[in-house]
Amino acid sequence: MNSISQGLKAISGAIGFNNLPKIKRQFTFYSEGKNYWPHLEGLLSATLEKTDKSVCYISSSLDDPGLMVEHPNLNTFFVGMGFVRDYFFQNLDTNIMVMTMPDLHNFQVKRSRHAVHYVYVQHSLVSLHMIYRHGAFDHYDTICAAGPHHVKEIRAIEEKYNLPKKNIVELGYSRLDSLIETAKNYPKNENKEKRAHKKILIAPSWGPKGVIESGLGKSLVEQLLNLGHEAILRPHPQTIKFARAKVDEIRNQHKDNPHFAFEGSVAGQESLHQSDIMVSDWSGAALEYAFALNKPVIFCDVPRKANNPDYQSIGIEPIEVSIREKIGVIWDGISPVVELVESCSRKSKSYLRTLSAQYCFNQGHSCDYFNDVLRIID
């Protein structure tokens, strides 16, 4: 579909939403696209199954699976990413808006001129004060915390900057629950623990100093393949968008190697379940991998992804810093990777499982607690 057709479809979606009777748009979910669907799927299902509320699902991506969901109490709309979306948000008239997008009201997407209660749902387990920008959550009314660290961080930010206290729901993390549930039914390879050669998933974050953008990813893939391991490259969508040449360079170099695979979407789970070890940097995917699947991580020691230069003033060490040597090992980019793979292979699954329960609320059934959001607001 060309840009003109998409623009017309976005206009149609915005008009369609506004033409609904108010009673049918009490509760609204917004998704930036298909990569955010895994974080909203369980919550949307729980709302439809456990309440009689009329629900709307709004997306900026036509390939978002959420737009395909059918339910008598659900209406879905596409609003695109441009001026139609911005106008739509400024004039949004719904009781509750649930989003996974930080920086509400700080950039193009503004709070509505109407009385809307905004709920933030985590799309990562990382801390809220280093990787995210300063003020990323200031304009939300309710924050759904994935774990105890999020509660401490929100309260510390409020105290530091003298902000009004938000509602906090100790929800958990539905993406984690989905991974745990899928893992129960995933075929088990009883011999993989003893294999000398491992299947290794490379799933870093994005940014100019990231694993792929810095060029470290290229040498890493080469080392792993030369050692006889299998390598799966799973770039962040923003890396594909802004550093496609770096990604294509790796893909083209190894496209004929049967031990190399490329995964262009982070919405799926297959590579997470197939692999034995993850290589990452500051990505929240590393925490999901360790906590949900109890598998170890090799962390590339690239500079911290600090989008908030004042994060240290909060006085809390971010979880993505403090957790690294508990769930994996750190690679300096120089020492042989083979030693790190062997070290990671010795990490105890039971230890990782215990850590997981400490860091995440309501593990395995977080969606059951989503109705707490409705109760707080009502």
Image: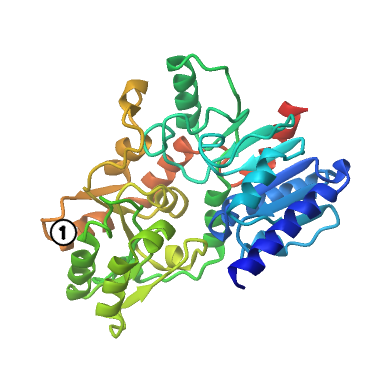
* Type of the residue with mark 1: Glu
The colour scheme used here is: rainbow
Q: Secondary structure at mark 1?
A: helix
In the rendered view, does 206 fall on the left or right side of 10?
left
Across and down, in percent, residue 180 comes to 53, 54
Residue depicted at x 45% and y 17% = 161
Q: Residues within 10 Å of mark 1 (few under 14, many from 20)?
A: few
Within the image, what quadrant is residue 227 found in? bottom left
In the rendered view, does 53 fall on the left or right side of 1?
right
Q: Is residue 118 above or below residue 267?
A: above
Residue 199 visible? The answer is no
Label total for image: 1
Across and down, in percent, residue 285 comes to 41, 52
Q: Is residue 259 above or below residue 364?
A: below
Residue depicted at x 17% and y 69% = 223
Query: 34 or 195: nearer the eye?
Result: 34
Q: Which residue lies most toward the bottom here?
A: 256
Residue depicted at x 45% and y 37% = 359
Q: Quadrant of the C terminus?
A: top right
Q: Is residue 372 above or below residue 271?
A: above
Across and down, in percent, residue 331 comes to 19, 52
Query: 76 or 193: nearer the eye?
Result: 76
In the rendered view, does 231 fall on the left or right side of 61?
left
In the rendered view, does 307 fall on the left or right side of 124?
left
Q: Quadrant of the N terminus?
A: bottom right
Q: Which residue is mark 1?
A: 339
Within the image, what quadrant is residue 244 found in? bottom left
Across and down, in percent, residue 102 comes to 51, 39
Within the image, what quadrant is residue 81 found in? bottom right
Residue 43 visible? The answer is yes
